[in-house]
């Protein structure tokens, strides 16, 4: 059995015993205060994050930026699928699944926004369709469909860029 | 010869061990958004971690005791308790991020959703920690983590505009049109990723596990001063790959799947296999380090017998804390929360906890009672103090910036 050097383990143990005895009501009160402060920060932060984020445009801008990222992801996936040999279909499919999930959330968020956002919603629907087409092309190893998906992604990205100052 | 082999292995392990989920996520996100415009922060973080890792290693080698043990003795139980609570919370969150990251890597390789892999990953991690020797885990995972260097090769293969990359790296101000608070929010998370508190706890406790003595001072110094900077370069290569591929498209890097795409573009199937293998090794290594760090912190504070070398019968509470930390992390990730989100929260927490971790190290490294003639020299103190100022600024600004920028949205 391997033993620790006495300067390490033994000293650690001795210090610990003294310290545990030294912990009294004050230490426990300090733990409670710290925990309460931490809980307050954790409780306030998420709410604050969603409401005070004034530095990155409107809610519609952020949804547009999210959609743009997912469309460009589809473009990169299509390019990776056109490599010889192509990147693994299983990995690219997972990446597209995540992109689709982000788009679904973006559509739900947009639907909750007051006002008319029909133009953007149409682009989001087109983006979701593009993700599906790219996924089928990746799974089938269909290079023609991948090239077509890449072109569609470029057009859709350009359309989204025209809608937001963030892009 | 054997000595040099050991040194090389140690340095290579430190290179691979520098990276974790926080480094991967923040470097990719920043590369896609700012290119190499925040490379100066990585440089600052590497200088900081080198300075404090060297101090911690020296403390262990000379005093034969881990940093946390001395902090508690030197500062008293109350001050050390604050350090313990903050560091433990952050480290458990960091552990959750690593476990979630490993599960996502397996999802990318298998197509099976990551939530299915969380429990097997946690159990596998616990078995490895239980059965495999400390040095073996460090060396194997550290060396395997070097596969992440495929990002650097990919950049070269993609033939970027090198002058544009150099121009980005030379800038130390926010790019035109980018909100200043968001720029500094990302700067702080990147800095916290480089200086995550668990690295010091693990390094110093691991030094005791590996029985460093004053004879090992040169080796531990070389390991820290060469290994961490090269690890920093690996982290920068992830940012550069995102800068080359994603920045021109105006897209964000929000998931590990997006992070690996530049490598897929450069090397197709082979590149993806290598990068997923590298990420797996790096994240399992970081999960091992964070889980062990939880055990080290708590055991050293309360004076329990501790160490991976000690059998569970002799260090039951240490082993129970390590297993319990893995279990808590598993439960956090199993809720379905996005591991990238957990990483971002852990990094903000780490930024806040940084002074509590590093200030005591600076104090103990100047204490002749523990270190004799091996206390900090003027240069170490100058670097340590400058970094302490940066750490304090980061800690104060982290939460306000997180709130005002909506986590860098």
Image (cartoon, coloured by chain):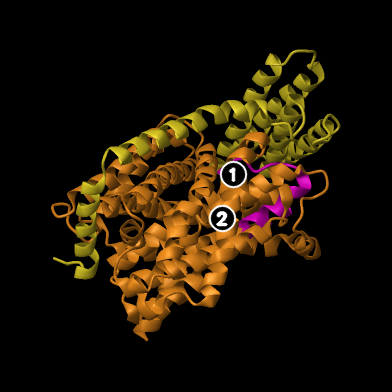
Chain colours: A yellow, B orange
Q: Residue at x 36, y 57 (%)?
A: B75
Residue B169 in the image: above or below residue B243: below
Outermost top residue: A115
Of B110 and B328, which appears nearest the observer? B328
| Place of residue A38 in the rendered image (x, y in percent of width and height, measured from the top left) | 46, 35
Judge whether residue B248 is colored magenta. Answer: yes
| Residue picked out by circle 2 | B391
| Place of residue B235 in the rendered image (x, y in percent of width and height, measured from the top left) | 58, 59
SS at circle 2: helix
**Of pointers 1 and 2, the one earlier in the residue sequence:** 2
Judge whether residue B346 is colored magenta. Answer: no
Q: Quadrant of residue A155?
A: top right
| Residue picked out by circle 1 | B398
Q: Residue at x 77, y 45 (%)?
A: B249
SS majority, magenta = helix
Give the residues drawn in magenta, as a range: B236-256
| Place of residue B311 in the rendered image (x, y in percent of width and height, measured from the top left) | 17, 56
Of B211 and A1, which appears nearest the observer? B211
Residue A145 in the image: above or below residue A18: above
Which of the image's four quarters has the N terminus of chain B? bottom left
User: Is residue B264 shown left or right of residue B171?
Assistant: left
Q: Is residue B269 visible?
A: no
Q: Is residue B49 visible?
A: yes
Outermost front residue: A26
**Subunit of label 2:** B
SS at circle 1: helix
């Amino acid at each position: 059995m391997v033993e620790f050097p006495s300067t390490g383990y033994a000293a650690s143990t001795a210090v610990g015993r003294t310290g545990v005895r030294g912990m009294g009501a004050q230490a426990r009160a300090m733990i409670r205060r710290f925990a309460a402060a931490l809980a307050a920060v954790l409780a306030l932060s998420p709410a604050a994050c969603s409401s005070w984020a004034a530095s990155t445009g409107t809610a519609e801008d952020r949804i547009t930026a999210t959609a743009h990222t997912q469309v460009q992801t589809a473009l990169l996936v299509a390019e990776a699928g056109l490599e010889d040999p192509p990147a693994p279909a299983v990995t690219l499919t997972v990446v597209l699944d995540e992109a689709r999930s982000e788009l679904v959330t973006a559509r739900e968020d947009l639907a909750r926004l007051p006002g008319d956002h029909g133009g953007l919603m149409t682009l989001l629907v087109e983006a979701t369709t593009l993700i599906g087409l790219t996924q089928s092309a990746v799974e089938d190893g269909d290079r023609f469909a991948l090239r077509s998906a890449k072109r569609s992604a470029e057009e859709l990205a350009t359309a989204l860029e025209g809608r937001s100052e963030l892009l | 010869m054997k000595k040099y082999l050991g040194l090389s292995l140690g340095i290579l392990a430190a290179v691979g061990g520098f990276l974790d989920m926080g480094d991967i996520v923040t470097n990719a996100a920043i590369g896609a958004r700012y290119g190499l415009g925040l490379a100066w922060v990585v440089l600052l973080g590497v200088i900081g971690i080198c300075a404090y890792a060297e101090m911690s290693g020296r403390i262990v080698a000379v005093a034969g005791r881990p940093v946390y043990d001395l902090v508690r003795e030197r500062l008293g139980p109350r001050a050390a308790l604050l350090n313990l609570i903050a560091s433990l919370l952050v480290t458990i969150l960091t552990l959750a991020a690593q476990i979630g990251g490993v599960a996502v890597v397996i999802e990318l390789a298998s197509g099976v959703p990551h939530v299915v892999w969380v429990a097997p990953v946690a159990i596998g991690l616990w078995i490895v920690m239980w059965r495999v020797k400390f040095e073996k885990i460090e060396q194997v995972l550290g060396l395997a983590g070097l596969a992440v260097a495929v990002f650097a090769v990919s950049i070269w293969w993609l033939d970027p505009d090198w002058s544009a990359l150099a121009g980005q790296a030379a800038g130390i101000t926010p790019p035109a049109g980018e909100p200043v608070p968001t720029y500094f929010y990302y700067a702080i998370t990147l800095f916290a990723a480089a200086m995550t508190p668990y690295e010091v706890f693990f390094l110093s406790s691991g030094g005791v596990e590996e029985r460093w003595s004053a004879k090992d001072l040169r080796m531990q110094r070389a390991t820290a001063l060469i290994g961490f900077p090269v690890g920093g370069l690996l982290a920068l290569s992830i940012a550069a790959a995102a800068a080359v591929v994603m920045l021109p498209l105006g897209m964000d890097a929000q998931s590990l799947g997006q992070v690996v795409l530049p490598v897929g573009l450069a090397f197709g199937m082979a590149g993806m296999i290598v990068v997923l293998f590298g990420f797996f090794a790096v994240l399992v290594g970081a999960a091992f380090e964070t889980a062990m760090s939880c055990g080290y912190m708590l055991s050293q504070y309360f004076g329990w017998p501790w160490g991976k070398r000690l059998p569970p019968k002799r260090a039951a509470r240490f082993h129970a804390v390590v297993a319990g930390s893995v279990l808590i992390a598993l439960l956090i990730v199993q809720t379905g929360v996005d591991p990238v989100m957990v990483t971002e929260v852990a990094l903000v927490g780490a930024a806040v906890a940084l002074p509590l971790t590093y200030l005591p190290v600076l104090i103990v490294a100047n204490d002749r009672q523990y270190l004799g003639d091996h206390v900090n020299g003027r240069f170490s103190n100058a670097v340590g103090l400058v970094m302490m100022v940066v750490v304090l600024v980061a800690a104060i600004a982290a939460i306000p910036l997180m709130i005002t920028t909506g986590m860098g949205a």
